[in-house]
Image (cartoon, rainbow, N blue to C red):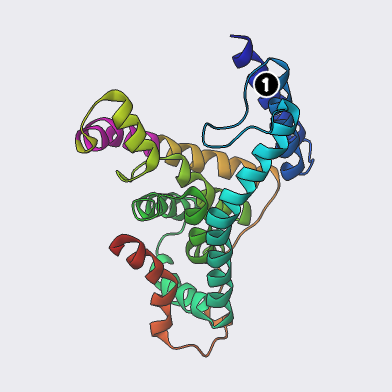
Amino acid sequence: MIEILIGALVAVGVGRYIVKGYSPTGVLLTGGLLLLIISVIMGKSVLPASVTSTGYRLIDIVEYVKNLLMSRGGDLGMMIMVLCGFASYMTHIGANDVVVKLASRPLKMINSPYLLMVAAYIVACLMSLAVSSATGLGVLLMATLFPVMVNMGISRGAAAAICASPASIILAPTSGDVILAAQASEMPLIDFAFKTTLPISIAAILGMCIAHFFWQRYLDRKEHIETEMLDVNEIKTHAPNFYAILPFHTYYWCISF
């Protein structure tokens, strides 16, 4: 019980300092190190079973951080760098501008940017079926959906929230969380994913759609943000129309492999 209380207090403290404007990276790192130190003081091991202890629990904290950086930096970190490079290249060759120009014409029929925002959120959730990594999904959405949403009159803050929040909904049956939960519940993966997780996820998506619609509108009005759709004639690009498929072909490879 004391462990849960300590974790909750640290989480509240981290959230408070982030809201106050402190660097999220530094605050999260400090909170994590504080929890590791408290764990050592309470006599608990901080290293996973696969990592050999240094013999000193305080030094084990450094060993844990080193092991984490090695595993995440070579795997997740490399993926993030590749995706960020891909997103920058799509902007450089004008592919994102072509997507915006082609998507703007049919979407102009929807007058409310907040309805467009909700539709974009649903599309983003469907994309999570192909990309189970939360970070990878966020980067891809920022490269593909974000420029379209901004140029359709959605504020940058709301568009960024749409790109970040789909990772909280689990739709992909191949997600590691779903697989582990199915094993823990001793249920077949297909039954657990489609009969247990999917109905809850759909209900959560509907709830998030409603929350996004009213909350993002409230924040835009509170900050006096005035948005308007970009005139597609203002977009100057010499890229051919077929470039519009390039930002999205990554989803094809994710689904295929």
Q: Residue 16 lies in what quarter of the image?
A: top right
Residue at which label 1 appears: 39
Question: Which amino acid type is shown beneath numbered disc 1?
Answer: Ser
Location of residue 140 with respect to 217 vertically, above or below: below
Q: Pick the quarter of the image with the N terminus.
A: top right
- Magenta residues: mostly which secondary structure? helix
149 to the left or right of 56? left
- Residue 252 seen in the current view: yes
Location of residue 183 with respect to 93 vertically, above or below: above
| Residue at the front extreme, as displayed | 55
Residue 223, percent from left and from top = 71, 46
Query: Residue at 64% of width from left, 48% of height from top?
Result: 69
Span highlighted in magenta in the image? 191-206
Query: Residue at 55% of width from left, 32% of height from top?
Result: 48
Residue 104, percent from left and from top = 45, 71
Query: Residue at 31% of width from left, 60% of height from top?
Result: 255
**Foreground of the two, 171 or 74:** 74
118 to the left or right of 6? left
Is disc 1 placed on a helix, strand or loop?
helix
**Foreground of the two, 38 or 13:** 38
Query: Residue at 21% of width from left, 38% of height from top?
Result: 190
